[in-house]
DNA sequence: CAGACTATATATAAGTC
DNA sequence: TGACTTATATATAGTCT
């Protein structure tokens, strides 16, 4: 019997896998909050977490009846955004103020 | 024995409480995504969720190495914000552009 | 009003296909 | 690239202090 704890314990999984009960360790792992080095993992995480963040922002705005905006600039310079209502408007800086310097700026 | 399911089943809790095993139903409940009518609950939720959102935004920016900004305008008009780096700047609209109309605007 | 407390609802890391 | 899977890490609703 593989002893009790199975809470994220890598030992547990090593044994499970060696026994052939599973091919791989499954389930969410704990993650240190620092830049994810693996590019593919970082990319995957970006995809999931950006969706998650937007979703949470949307829920939050509805549940609590407040205006929320989320702005994400991916490292390829792409803009992703969520705005709960039209009382918050999101736009490329340069698009609205072509004459002003293009420091990314959030104005509320 | 109070039969199996305890997953959010209100029946389960009615019985538990009637038996005096607990004073109240505990644990997170499911919540419909619509404006929370109870003012105090809404307020409480605002507090918890705004913190949660900011935290997630921060984690996200670190893990995925991207710039993120979150802007919240509470219904009392208060501004709450998070910005991962100084490449995103958050400010009251009127403060930067005193001559322009004061439509809340997020410019990136 | 701001935390502590629990049980549960949700978000998600890696793998697989 | 993206959709599924599964176990686990996290976020939180409602109560109480």
Image (cartoon, coloured by chain):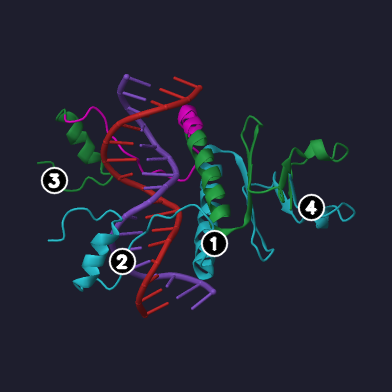
Chain colours: A green, B cyan, C purple, D red
- Disc 3 versus disc 4: nearer the observer: 4
Q: Name the chain under label 1.
A: B
Residue at horizontal 26 percent and vertical 64 percent from the top: B13
Q: Secondary structure at mark 3?
A: loop
Label 3 to label 2, Cα distance in Å?
33 Å
Q: Which residue bears the numbered disc 3? A: A3
Q: Is residue A36 magenta?
A: yes
- Disc 1 versus disc 2: nearer the observer: 2
Q: Is residue A26 magenta?
A: yes
Q: Which residue bears the numbered disc 4? A: B103
Measured as percent of width and height from the top left, residue A1 is found at 9, 41
Callouts 1 and 4 on one subunit: yes
Could you say which disc has been placed on residue A10 in the image? none
Q: Secondary structure at mark 4?
A: loop
Magenta part of the protein: which range? A21-44
Could you say which disc has been placed on residue B46 in the image? 1
Question: Dot 2 surroundings within 10 Å: few (below 14), some, or many (20 or more)?
Answer: some
Measured as percent of width and height from the top left, residue B92 is found at 76, 56
Whether residue A71 is visible: no
Question: Dot 4 surroundings within 10 Å: few (below 14), some, or many (20 or more)?
Answer: few
Callouts 1 and 2 on one subunit: yes
Q: Are marks 3 and 4 in contact (CB under 8 Å)?
A: no
Q: Which residue bears the numbered disc 2? A: B25
Q: Nearer the viewer, residue A60 or B68?
A: A60
């Amino acid at each position: 019997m593989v002893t009790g704890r199975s809470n994220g314990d890598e030992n547990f999984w090593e044994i499970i896998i060696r026994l052939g009960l599973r091919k791989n360790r499954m389930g969410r792992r704990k993650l240190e909050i620092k830049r994810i080095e693996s590019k593919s993992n970082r990319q995957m995480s970006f995809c999931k977490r950006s969706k998650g963040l937007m979703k949470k922002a949307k829920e939050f705005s509805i549940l609590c009846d407040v205006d929320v905006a989320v702005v994400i600039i991916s490292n390829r310079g792409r803009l992703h955004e969520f705005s709960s209502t039209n009382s918050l408007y999101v736009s490329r800086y340069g698009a609205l103020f072509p004459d002003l310097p293009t420091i990314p700026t959030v104005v509320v």
